[in-house]
Image: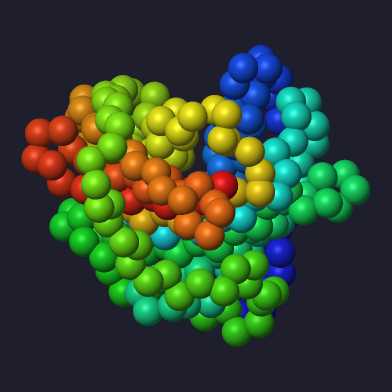
Amino acid sequence: MEVSAYNETFELPAATADDSRLKALLALFEEMMETAGRHAEILGVGVRDLHPKGLTWVLARLHVKVNIIPGGGQPVHIATWPAGRHRLFALREFRLSDDSDNEILRASSAWALMNMETRRPARLDPHLPVFTRHPERMIADDFPALPPGQQAGSQASYRAVAADIDLNDHVNNTVYMAWALRSIPAKILRPPLTLEAAFLGEARLGDEIVCRSESAVENGRTIFLQSLQDAVSGRELNRLRWGF
Protein backbone atom coordinates (compact mmCIF):
# COMPACT_ATOMS: atom_id res chain seq x y z
CA MET A 1 0.00 0.00 0.00
CA GLU A 2 1.44 3.34 -1.07
CA VAL A 3 1.10 6.22 1.37
CA SER A 4 1.99 9.91 1.27
CA ALA A 5 2.48 12.54 3.95
CA TYR A 6 -0.58 13.83 5.78
CA ASN A 7 -0.58 17.58 6.47
CA GLU A 8 -2.29 19.80 9.02
CA THR A 9 -1.75 23.34 10.32
CA PHE A 10 -2.40 24.67 13.81
CA GLU A 11 -1.68 27.87 15.72
CA LEU A 12 0.41 27.85 18.87
CA PRO A 13 -1.46 29.15 21.92
CA ALA A 14 -0.34 32.36 23.57
CA ALA A 15 1.91 31.96 26.62
CA THR A 16 3.51 34.21 29.21
CA ALA A 17 7.18 35.10 28.87
CA ASP A 18 8.10 32.95 31.89
CA ASP A 19 6.89 29.66 30.44
CA SER A 20 6.61 30.33 26.72
CA ARG A 21 9.22 27.74 25.65
CA LEU A 22 7.76 25.07 27.93
CA LYS A 23 4.19 25.63 26.73
CA ALA A 24 5.25 25.82 23.09
CA LEU A 25 7.16 22.52 23.26
CA LEU A 26 4.26 20.79 24.98
CA ALA A 27 1.84 22.15 22.38
CA LEU A 28 4.07 20.88 19.56
CA PHE A 29 4.29 17.40 21.09
CA GLU A 30 0.54 17.25 21.73
CA GLU A 31 -0.38 18.32 18.20
CA MET A 32 2.07 15.81 16.72
CA MET A 33 0.33 12.97 18.53
CA GLU A 34 -3.17 14.24 17.72
CA THR A 35 -2.30 14.63 14.04
CA ALA A 36 -0.79 11.14 13.93
CA GLY A 37 -3.99 9.77 15.45
CA ARG A 38 -6.17 11.49 12.85
CA HIS A 39 -3.99 10.17 10.03
CA ALA A 40 -4.22 6.64 11.44
CA GLU A 41 -8.02 6.98 11.46
CA ILE A 42 -7.96 8.02 7.80
CA LEU A 43 -5.83 4.96 7.00
CA GLY A 44 -8.31 2.72 8.83
CA VAL A 45 -5.91 1.78 11.62
CA GLY A 46 -6.82 4.29 14.33
CA VAL A 47 -7.61 3.37 17.92
CA ARG A 48 -11.35 3.36 17.18
CA ASP A 49 -10.72 0.76 14.46
CA LEU A 50 -8.56 -1.34 16.77
CA HIS A 51 -10.59 -1.23 20.00
CA PRO A 52 -13.33 -3.58 18.67
CA LYS A 53 -10.51 -6.10 18.04
CA GLY A 54 -9.25 -5.72 21.60
CA LEU A 55 -6.15 -3.85 20.38
CA THR A 56 -4.75 -0.34 20.60
CA TRP A 57 -1.64 1.68 19.73
CA VAL A 58 0.93 2.64 22.35
CA LEU A 59 3.94 4.86 21.78
CA ALA A 60 7.12 2.91 22.51
CA ARG A 61 9.93 5.25 21.40
CA LEU A 62 10.32 8.86 20.31
CA HIS A 63 13.36 10.73 18.96
CA VAL A 64 13.01 14.48 18.36
CA LYS A 65 15.41 17.14 17.10
CA VAL A 66 14.19 20.70 17.73
CA ASN A 67 15.69 23.58 15.72
CA ILE A 68 13.24 26.37 16.57
CA ILE A 69 10.70 26.96 19.34
CA PRO A 70 8.07 29.24 17.76
CA GLY A 71 6.31 31.98 19.66
CA GLY A 72 2.67 31.98 20.68
CA GLY A 73 0.14 32.70 17.94
CA GLN A 74 2.40 31.46 15.14
CA PRO A 75 1.10 28.87 12.64
CA VAL A 76 2.83 25.50 12.57
CA HIS A 77 2.59 23.06 9.66
CA ILE A 78 2.76 19.36 10.53
CA ALA A 79 3.57 16.60 8.04
CA THR A 80 3.41 13.00 9.25
CA TRP A 81 3.52 9.59 7.60
CA PRO A 82 4.06 5.89 8.39
CA ALA A 83 7.54 4.72 7.44
CA GLY A 84 7.52 0.96 7.51
CA ARG A 85 8.33 -1.43 10.35
CA HIS A 86 11.19 -2.25 12.67
CA ARG A 87 10.90 -5.44 14.70
CA LEU A 88 7.49 -5.30 16.44
CA PHE A 89 7.23 -1.55 15.88
CA ALA A 90 5.34 0.50 13.31
CA LEU A 91 7.40 3.59 12.47
CA ARG A 92 5.95 7.07 12.02
CA GLU A 93 7.79 10.25 11.03
CA PHE A 94 7.10 13.94 11.62
CA ARG A 95 8.31 17.23 10.17
CA LEU A 96 7.08 20.55 11.58
CA SER A 97 7.76 23.85 9.81
CA ASP A 98 6.77 27.51 9.82
CA ASP A 99 5.18 29.60 7.06
CA SER A 100 8.59 30.03 5.37
CA ASP A 101 9.23 26.26 5.47
CA ASN A 102 11.92 26.69 8.11
CA GLU A 103 12.14 23.40 9.97
CA ILE A 104 10.87 23.66 13.55
CA LEU A 105 11.55 20.05 14.41
CA ARG A 106 11.82 16.58 12.96
CA ALA A 107 10.99 13.33 14.73
CA SER A 108 10.87 9.59 14.37
CA SER A 109 8.62 7.40 16.50
CA ALA A 110 7.98 3.69 17.07
CA TRP A 111 4.54 2.36 17.97
CA ALA A 112 3.48 -1.04 19.26
CA LEU A 113 0.12 -2.77 19.08
CA MET A 114 -1.09 -3.68 22.57
CA ASN A 115 -3.62 -6.33 23.55
CA MET A 116 -5.99 -4.39 25.81
CA GLU A 117 -6.83 -7.42 27.94
CA THR A 118 -3.33 -8.76 28.57
CA ARG A 119 -1.65 -5.31 28.25
CA ARG A 120 1.11 -7.02 26.27
CA PRO A 121 2.42 -6.36 22.73
CA ALA A 122 0.62 -7.95 19.77
CA ARG A 123 1.87 -8.73 16.27
CA LEU A 124 1.33 -6.08 13.60
CA ASP A 125 -0.02 -8.62 11.10
CA PRO A 126 -2.76 -8.84 9.98
CA HIS A 127 -3.94 -5.57 11.55
CA LEU A 128 -1.57 -3.11 9.86
CA PRO A 129 -1.19 -2.79 6.07
CA VAL A 130 2.31 -3.09 4.65
CA PHE A 131 3.27 0.35 3.37
CA THR A 132 5.63 -0.49 0.53
CA ARG A 133 6.24 3.08 -0.60
CA HIS A 134 6.44 6.04 1.74
CA PRO A 135 8.46 9.26 2.26
CA GLU A 136 11.88 9.15 3.89
CA ARG A 137 12.60 8.78 7.58
CA MET A 138 13.38 12.00 9.40
CA ILE A 139 15.85 10.46 11.88
CA ALA A 140 17.70 7.21 11.19
CA ASP A 141 17.24 5.50 14.55
CA ASP A 142 16.92 1.76 15.23
CA PHE A 143 15.87 2.61 18.80
CA PRO A 144 18.44 0.75 20.92
CA ALA A 145 17.81 0.71 24.67
CA LEU A 146 18.43 4.04 26.40
CA PRO A 147 21.01 3.84 29.21
CA PRO A 148 19.71 4.20 32.78
CA GLY A 149 20.79 6.98 35.09
CA GLN A 150 23.96 6.46 37.11
CA GLN A 151 23.66 8.83 40.07
CA ALA A 152 21.13 10.37 42.43
CA GLY A 153 19.79 13.72 41.28
CA SER A 154 16.81 15.97 41.79
CA GLN A 155 13.32 14.57 42.31
CA ALA A 156 9.76 15.80 41.67
CA SER A 157 6.42 14.08 42.28
CA TYR A 158 3.18 14.17 40.30
CA ARG A 159 -0.21 12.49 40.61
CA ALA A 160 -2.25 11.30 37.62
CA VAL A 161 -5.61 13.09 37.42
CA ALA A 162 -8.58 12.53 35.13
CA ALA A 163 -7.34 15.02 32.50
CA ASP A 164 -4.13 12.95 32.12
CA ILE A 165 -5.94 9.76 31.06
CA ASP A 166 -6.43 8.85 27.38
CA LEU A 167 -8.65 6.46 25.41
CA ASN A 168 -6.46 3.54 26.47
CA ASP A 169 -7.32 4.20 30.14
CA HIS A 170 -3.76 5.14 31.07
CA VAL A 171 -1.68 8.31 31.31
CA ASN A 172 -1.18 9.90 27.90
CA ASN A 173 2.38 9.87 26.56
CA THR A 174 2.46 13.69 26.30
CA VAL A 175 1.73 13.94 30.04
CA TYR A 176 4.97 12.07 30.83
CA MET A 177 6.84 14.56 28.66
CA ALA A 178 5.11 17.45 30.41
CA TRP A 179 6.14 16.13 33.83
CA ALA A 180 9.69 15.65 32.60
CA LEU A 181 9.92 19.12 31.03
CA ARG A 182 8.72 20.79 34.23
CA SER A 183 11.69 19.23 36.00
CA ILE A 184 14.23 20.87 33.66
CA PRO A 185 15.59 24.36 34.50
CA ALA A 186 13.91 26.92 32.22
CA LYS A 187 17.22 28.69 31.53
CA ILE A 188 18.62 25.71 29.59
CA LEU A 189 15.40 24.90 27.74
CA ARG A 190 16.57 26.38 24.45
CA PRO A 191 17.04 25.02 20.92
CA PRO A 192 18.77 23.31 19.36
CA LEU A 193 17.74 20.44 21.59
CA THR A 194 17.18 16.72 21.27
CA LEU A 195 14.89 14.28 23.05
CA GLU A 196 15.04 10.50 23.12
CA ALA A 197 12.26 8.81 25.08
CA ALA A 198 11.38 5.21 25.87
CA PHE A 199 7.86 4.46 27.14
CA LEU A 200 8.17 1.39 29.34
CA GLY A 201 4.99 1.04 31.38
CA GLU A 202 1.55 2.37 32.20
CA ALA A 203 0.36 4.76 34.90
CA ARG A 204 -3.32 4.88 35.85
CA LEU A 205 -5.68 7.38 37.41
CA GLY A 206 -4.57 8.30 40.92
CA ASP A 207 -1.05 6.89 40.63
CA GLU A 208 1.77 8.92 42.14
CA ILE A 209 4.74 9.30 39.79
CA VAL A 210 8.27 10.31 40.76
CA CYS A 211 10.48 12.03 38.19
CA ARG A 212 14.20 11.60 38.92
CA SER A 213 16.58 13.85 36.97
CA GLU A 214 20.34 14.05 36.70
CA SER A 215 22.57 16.16 34.49
CA ALA A 216 26.00 15.80 32.94
CA VAL A 217 28.16 17.48 30.30
CA GLU A 218 29.12 15.48 27.20
CA ASN A 219 31.18 17.05 24.38
CA GLY A 220 30.19 20.52 25.50
CA ARG A 221 26.47 19.74 25.69
CA THR A 222 24.27 19.56 28.77
CA ILE A 223 22.60 16.16 29.00
CA PHE A 224 19.59 15.51 31.21
CA LEU A 225 18.71 11.90 32.03
CA GLN A 226 15.28 11.35 33.53
CA SER A 227 13.38 8.37 34.86
CA LEU A 228 9.67 8.47 35.70
CA GLN A 229 8.74 5.76 38.17
CA ASP A 230 5.69 4.53 40.05
CA ALA A 231 6.14 5.91 43.58
CA VAL A 232 4.79 2.75 45.26
CA SER A 233 6.39 -0.09 43.28
CA GLY A 234 9.43 1.73 41.88
CA ARG A 235 8.54 0.37 38.43
CA GLU A 236 10.05 2.52 35.66
CA LEU A 237 7.43 3.94 33.30
CA ASN A 238 9.39 6.33 31.12
CA ARG A 239 13.09 7.02 30.44
CA LEU A 240 14.20 10.23 28.73
CA ARG A 241 17.46 11.70 27.50
CA TRP A 242 17.55 15.42 26.66
CA GLY A 243 20.45 17.20 24.98
CA PHE A 244 20.96 20.99 25.00
In screen coordinates, is 230 left or right of 220? left
Q: Is residue 32 above or below residue 211?
A: below
In screen coordinates, is 211 left or right of 74? left
What residue sits 27% from the left and 25% below the top?
157
Residue 12 falls in image quadrant: top right
In screen coordinates, is 213 left or right of 20? left
Q: Is residue 93 above or below residue 174?
A: below
In percent of width and height, residue 23 lies at 59, 27
What residue sits 39% from the left and 24% below the top?
163
Q: Is residue 58 above or below residue 25?
A: below
Q: Does residue 1 appear in this view?
A: yes
Q: Does residue 168 appear in this view?
A: no
Q: Is residue 21 above or below residue 49?
A: above
Residue 191 falls in image quadrant: top right
In percent of width and height, residue 6 lies at 70, 58
**The N terminus: image quadrant:** bottom right
Q: Residue furthest left?
A: 233
Depth check, front residue: 152 or 15: 152
In percent of width and height, residue 205 lies at 24, 29
What residue sits 65% from the left and 24% below the top?
20
In screen coordinates, is 89 left or right of 55? right
Please state the total of marks drawn on the protein image.
0
Residue 186 falls in image quadrant: top right
